[in-house]
Amino acid sequence: MIELIGTNAGLVWHVLNEGGKLSLKELKKATKIKAEKDLYAALGWLAKEGKLGFEEVESGISVYLL
């Protein structure tokens, strides 16, 4: 499970590095991570490492690299 979270965290990082700030929906689509729980685990991993910023917008939450 830890390996999957790390792999997904890498996918999230690469997508955000290329695409800039994205909504959670856009991020899920771009990474092709199927389960929301897997996306949230990857986000938690990167957030804990201090690599992500979050912004609350009208449509939900946007995520970006710090």
Image: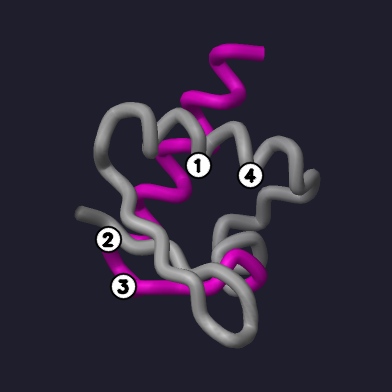
Q: Position of residue 41 (x, y in %)?
A: 60, 32
> Which residues fall within the magenta stretch?
1-25
The answer for how far apart the CA atoms under marks 4 and 2 are is 16 Å
Who's the residue at 55% across and 15% down the image?
Answer: 3
Kindly identify the amino acid type of the residue bearing the numbered disc 2: Asn
> In what element is the residue under mark 2?
helix
Q: Which mark is residue 20?
A: 3
18 shown above or below 38: below
Kindly identify the amino acid type of the residue bearing the numbered disc 3: Gly
Who's the residue at 32% across and 55% down the image?
Answer: 53
Q: Earlier in the sequence, mark 4 or mark 2?
A: 2
Q: Is residue 12 left or right of residue 31?
A: left
Q: Position of residue 65 (x, y in %)?
A: 27, 56
Mark 4 neighbour class, 10 Å CA radius: few under 14, some 14 to 19, many 20 or more:
many
Q: Quadrant of residue 40?
A: top right
Q: Give 41 or 11, whichever is nearer the viewer.
A: 41
Q: Earlier in the sequence, mark 3 or mark 1?
A: 3
The answer for how far apart the CA atoms under marks 4 and 3 are is 17 Å
**Residue annotated with mark 2:** 17
